[in-house]
Image: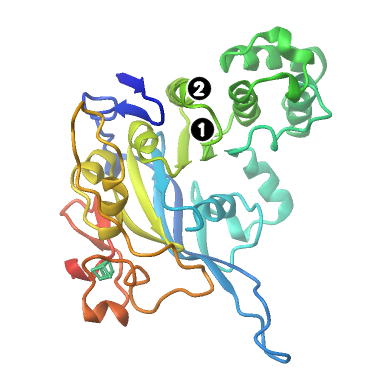
Amino acid sequence: MVCYVDSTVLYYNNKNGINSVQKQMKDQEQLLSVSDLRVHFPGRKSGFLGKPLPIQVVNGVSFEVYKGETLGLVGESGCGKTTLGRALIRLGHPVVSGKILFEGREISALGNREFRFLRKEMQMIFQDPFGSLNPRLTVGQMLAEVLLVHGIARGEAARKRIEELLNIVGLNSEYYNRYPHEFSGGQRQRIGIARAIAVNPKFIICDEPVSALDVSIQSQIINLLKDLQRDLGLTYLFIAHDLSVVEYISDRVAVMYLGKIVEIADSAELYANPKHPYTKALLSAIPNPEPGGKKERILLNGDLPGPLSIPSGCSFHPRCPVAKAECRNREPKLRNLNNNNSHQASCLLYE
Ligand code: SF4
C-alpha cells in the first residue's frame, strides 16, 4: 500500500492490489437487500388548505450488500446518502415504501421489540465523533451501558471486555475513566468504533467516519476499519464524499444523485471505466497524485437542486454536459452494462 499526504488531500494508491483481488460477489451470500426504498420528509403545505408536499430525499433505491464486503456510497452533500444509511437501521424519518431485508428478514415488518434484537447486528459509526458521545459519561460508563442494554456483560466481565475493546481500537485501557472532551478527534472516533463493535455486529454503516478528522489521522482510522473487517468478519456500508478514501476501502461503489443510485460497480471498474456522466464529473475532480500529472476536469453547471425541485426526466439533465432533448422528459432506469451484472448505470446514453 502507498498512502501519502500533501497539504490538502490524502491519496491512497490502490492500483497495486489492496482491493485488486475483488471478491466474487456473485458467489457470496447477501447480507442486506434493499428494493425500491423511498424516504420522504413532510414538507410545507401548498396553500391554506393544500396538503404538505413531501420532500423526496430517498427516491426508489435498490441495491444489495454481500457478506464481508465494503460497499462505498458516494455523492454530493444533500444527495440523500446519510438519510439512506439511517433508514437502513430505522433511525430518523420512517421509510415510506420499499423493502429492506437483513439476512432475509424484512426490517420494516418487525415490531420494535423484535427489531431491538436485530439492531444489535447493525451498528453505525457517525461522522461527528464528539456529537455522538455522551459528554457526561466516561468511556467506561458509556461502553458498559451498551454491554448492559444488550445483555452482553456486566460488572467485572464488562470491565474486562471494555479494556479489551479499547485495546482493539488502539486506545490505552487506562483511558477507561476519561471523558470524551479529554480525547482528540481521532481518539473519539476510535471510541465510536469501539461502541459499534462492542455488541459483535455483522453490519456497520460508516457515515462519513473520517470527514471531520485531520488528513493525517484519516488513514489511521481507515486502516483500523480494514483490520477490524478482516479480523471480525464485518460488512460495511461506507458513506463518504471523498472519492480517494472510498476507492481505497471499497469493494464496490454506488454513486447517488438526488435520492437515486445512478451507477454501481466494482470499485476498480468504476474508477477505471465510469459510465454515468455524473460519475465521470465526480472522478475528474480527484487530483492526480502523480508528479506533474494532469487531468481534464469536467465542470458541472450550477448546484445540486433541492429535493423539493427535482427536475423532470433525468434529474441530472440541467447539469449534464452531454444531455439530449429527450433527457428532459424521459427518466432512465438503472441498467446492466455487462454480462455479469456487476456494472449498472442509469443514463439514456446506454438505452
Ligand atoms: Fe445526461 Fe441524459 Fe444520461 Fe441523464 S440521461 S445522465 S441527462 S445523458
Image height check: is 63 above or below 267?
below
- Give the residue type that dot 1 points to: Val
CA distance for labels 1 and 2: 8 Å
* Ligand 1 quarter of the rendering: bottom left
Q: Is residue 337 left or right of residue 135?
A: left
Q: Quadrant of residue 65?
A: top left
- As helix, strand or loop, the secondary structure at mark 1 comes to loop
In screen coordinates, is 153 left or right of 12? right
- In the image, residue 346 lies at what x, y percent? 28, 64
Q: Amino acid at mark 2?
A: Ile
Can you tell which mark lies on residue 16? none
Mark number, residue 210: 1
Q: Where is residue 130 shown, x and y percent of the image? A: 69, 32
Per the image, the residue denoted by label 2 is: 217
Establish if 172 lies above or below 61.
Answer: above
Q: Nearer the viewer, residue 153 or 126?
A: 126
Q: Residue at x 33, y 42 (%)?
A: 252
At 41% from the left edge and 76% from the top edge, which residue is drawn? 311
